[in-house]
Image: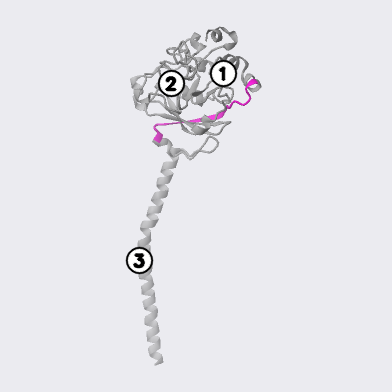
Amino acid sequence: MDDAENDPDNGDLEDVGEAEEGPVDDDDDGLLDGATGHNHNRGGLRASSPNDAATDDEVAIVRCATTAGPITLHLHKSWSPNGYEKASSLFERGYYDGSHLFRVVPHFLVQFGISYTTDAELKRFADASVPDDPKRNDLMPFREGYISFAGSGPHSRTSQLFVAYDRSQGLGNSPWETPFGEVAEGMEKVRNFYSGYGDMPPWGKGPEQGPIRNRGSKYIEENFPLLDRFETCTVERVGSLEEGEGAMDDGPSGEEASPVIAAPRKMKEDAALAETENSFPLAGVIVIVVGSLILGGVLARRTKQAGKHV
């Protein structure tokens, strides 16, 4: 990896190592990140504290339109508080919108996170690293659909993310490889992201990170036109997944029903139905009684009239 790191056109390099059949990297199987030159936490997020325990169950439901179809991600604060907050904020601010899935290695991973944004403040925010989070043993080893940051060393997580495929159990040894989310819907679309260019050099003929940073989308469109990309993403933060179950959207292009509004509306409808059902028997009894009285009076009159004619 020395040649890649010394090449000025490579820019910042973040990697998730290589697939098991490839060569072994000097940094174990970690995500190489030339961004170690960044001032860690410059303009970044604060580390989580015990006072945040009350919101540990918070979940960000991220719905993204991609060129391969819609996908939904669930980001869990309790899995990795610092990683969760950074990734959720980047999605909320549109950092990943329009960016390419530039590294797709079947059965290993798909990597993304080099934006084409022209917003200088957003770029600074994205490049600022956040502290690593403690690993949770119950989330290891990596499973297909897990989402984590790429990095190059301790406390090097900035903006690049990866989604694990089905043979990624070797991931998770490096301090920055801490899952903070998962693919909740559309994993089949994630598996089908275009992978024909192979891994990045030297393991394949895919895009290099430096030219993506320096030349933008033009580099991808001219040399790797078949790569898939994000279109737009929306984010809904909820106190827990149960709160988000009222959402009616099945993908990023549809309209969502707010779970906070949907629940009371359903309760009112149920109450109205119950009131109608409960009032029906009483109304029926009244109708029957009144009808009986009327019928009785009519029959009595007819009997009297019939007697007069006899």
Q: CA distance from mark 3 to mark 2?
A: 65 Å
Identify the residue position indicated by label 1 in the image: 204
Identify the residue position indicated by label 2 in the image: 83
Identify the residue position indicated by label 3 in the image: 285
Q: Amino acid at mark 2?
A: Gly
The image shows residue 248 at horizontal and vertical percentages of: 48, 40
Q: Which of pointers 3 and 2 indicates the residue nearer the eye?
A: 2
Question: Which of disc 1 and disc 2 is earlier in sequence?
Answer: 2
Q: CA distance from mark 1 to mark 3?
A: 81 Å
Badge 1 crowding class, 10 Å Cα cut-off, few under 14, some 14 to 19, many 20 or more, is some
Residue 114 falls in image quadrant: top right
Vertical side of 197 occupied by 257: above or below:
below
| Extent of the magenta region | 223-241
Indicate the secondary structure of the residue bearing disc 3: helix
Whether the residues at callouts 2 and 1 have beta carbons within 8 Å, the answer is no
Q: CA distance from mark 2 to mark 1?
A: 29 Å
**Residue closest to the eye, 211 or 191:** 191
Q: Amino acid at mark 1?
A: Gly
Indicate the secondary structure of the residue bearing disc 2: helix
